[in-house]
Amino acid sequence: MILVQTQDFDIAEQYCGLREEAANAGAIVTFTGLVREFYESTTTLEPRVESLFLEHYPGMTEKALVDIETQARARWDVQACRVIHRVGELRGGDQIVYVGVASTHRGDAFAAAEFIMDYLKTRAPFWKRQSTSAGAQWIESRAADEAARERWVTDKTDPDVPH
């Protein structure tokens, strides 16, 4: 299940849905991302994030998320998968993303969930603008996110080929 939405989500409800979809699962791994009050801050001297606004192109975004899930299913034993990404205006502490993976074995569930998150951060077409007391700015991709995604790439000639 892939959802791009403005409304919040219930983690317990999503977990129960995974259990129902994958009745023979041996493991369910979930990840919930939250909006940070400080972006890339190592001190509290930087202005606190007042809001984060996420934009996307409907249709294109869902297609990219389906592709990411399909790649994960091709690599690991994924019995059920849920990806929810919020868009619109969010505040510090708000839930922004949910990834849940059910599998026969924990290793596959952990790997698939990490893969999905690494690809969401680098290949999903979302644009983020943060607002602080110092003004608003678009957030650029981080080298650390690209490095995390790179570990899944075995064909180094094509950065979009995950296997």
Image (cartoon, rainbow, N blue to C red):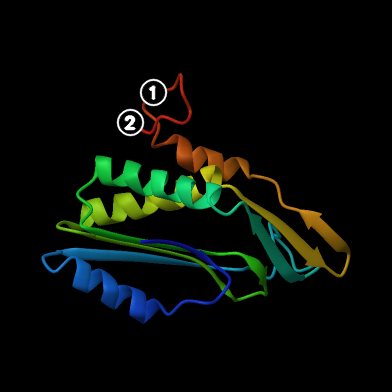
Seen at 61% across and 68% down, the residue is 35
Q: Residue furthest left?
A: 24
Name the kind of residue labelled 1 in the image: Asp
Q: Quadrant of the C terminus?
A: top left
Where residue 25 appears, as percent x and y from the top left, is 15, 64
| Residue 107 appears in the figure | yes
Residue 143 in which image quadrant: top right
Where residue 106 appears, as percent x and y from the top left, is 21, 58
Q: Toward the viewer: 31 or 98?
A: 98
Seen at 63% across and 45% down, the residue is 142
Res. 163 mark: 2
Res. 115 mark: none
Seen at 49% across and 50% down, the residue is 120
- Depicted 151 relative to depicted 96: above or below: above
Q: Which residue is mark 1?
A: 155
Q: Residue furthest right?
A: 134
Q: Residue furthest top?
A: 157
| Residue 46 appears in the figure | no
Where residue 144 appears, as percent x and y from the top left, is 57, 44
Q: Is residue 162 left or right of residue 123?
A: left
Callout 1: SS: loop
Seen at 66% across and 60% down, the residue is 54
Q: Are the two marked residues, 1 and 2, in contact with CB atoms closer than 8 angstroms?
A: yes
Q: Quadrant of the N terminus?
A: bottom left
Where residue 53 appears, as percent x and y from the top left, is 70, 64
Q: Is residue 119 left or right of residue 80?
A: right
- Depicted 124 relative to depicted 159: above or below: below
Q: CA distance from mark 1 to mark 2?
A: 7 Å
Mark 1 or mark 2: which comes first in sequence? 1
Q: Toward the viewer: 110 or 17?
A: 17
Name the kind of residue labelled 2 in the image: His
